[in-house]
Image (cartoon, grey):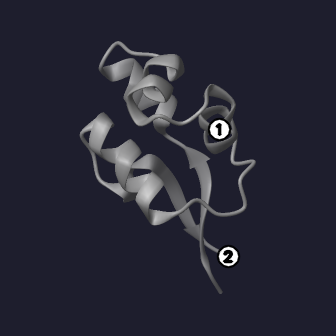
Amino acid sequence: MEYVPVRCRIPVLLKQIGKNQQWLADRTGLGKQRISDIVHLRMDNISIQRAALIAYHLDCTIDDLWVWEWR
């Protein structure tokens, strides 16, 4: 059994602060396509450093970036 992300909360967190994915891409230095891949769970694994960077700019914890489930 493993703990896996089943839904990304980044769009909700961005909406709460009135920003978009382009803003997040600019702030983190990641490409817009990379942010889109993260949001749509197209990346098999994301580094803890990238997750921490995104969480920092969204003022949340890494766990808050996704809805997690045991599978």
Cα distance, mark 2 to mark 1? 25 Å
Q: Quadrant of residue 49?
A: bottom left
In the picture shown, does residue 58 fall above or below 63?
above
In the picture shown, does residue 68 fall above or below 53?
below
In the picture shown, does residue 20 fall above or below 60?
above
Identify residue type, mark 1: Arg
Question: Residue 60, image x and y in percent?
Answer: 27, 45
Quick one: label 2, few (<14), some, or many (20+) residues within 10 Å?
few
Question: Residue 27, image x and y in percent?
Answer: 38, 28
Q: Quadrant of residue 37?
A: top right
Q: Identify which residue is drawn at 30% across, 19% down.
A: 17
Specify the label residue 34 is tagged with: 1
Specify the label residue 68 is tagged with: none
Quick one: label 1, few (<14), some, or many (20+) residues within 10 Å?
few
Residue beneath disc 2: 71
In this view, which residue lies farthest toward the left? 59
Side of 40 relative to 26 (left or right)? right
Mark nearest the camera among 2 and 1 is 1
In this view, which residue lies farthest toward the front? 29
Question: Residue 2, image x and y in percent?
Answer: 62, 81
In this view, which residue lies farthest toward the top? 18
Side of 18 relative to 66 (left or right)? left
The tag earlier along the polypeptide, 2 or 1, is 1
Position of the N terminus by quadrant: bottom right
Q: Identify which residue is drawn at 51% across, 53% down.
A: 67
Side of 9 relative to 36 (left or right)? left
Position of the C terminus by quadrant: bottom right
Q: Tag 1's secondary structure?
A: helix
Identify residue type, mark 2: Arg
**In this orientation, which residue lies closer to the viewer: 34 or 62?**
34
Q: Identify which residue is drawn at 52% across, 61% down.
A: 68
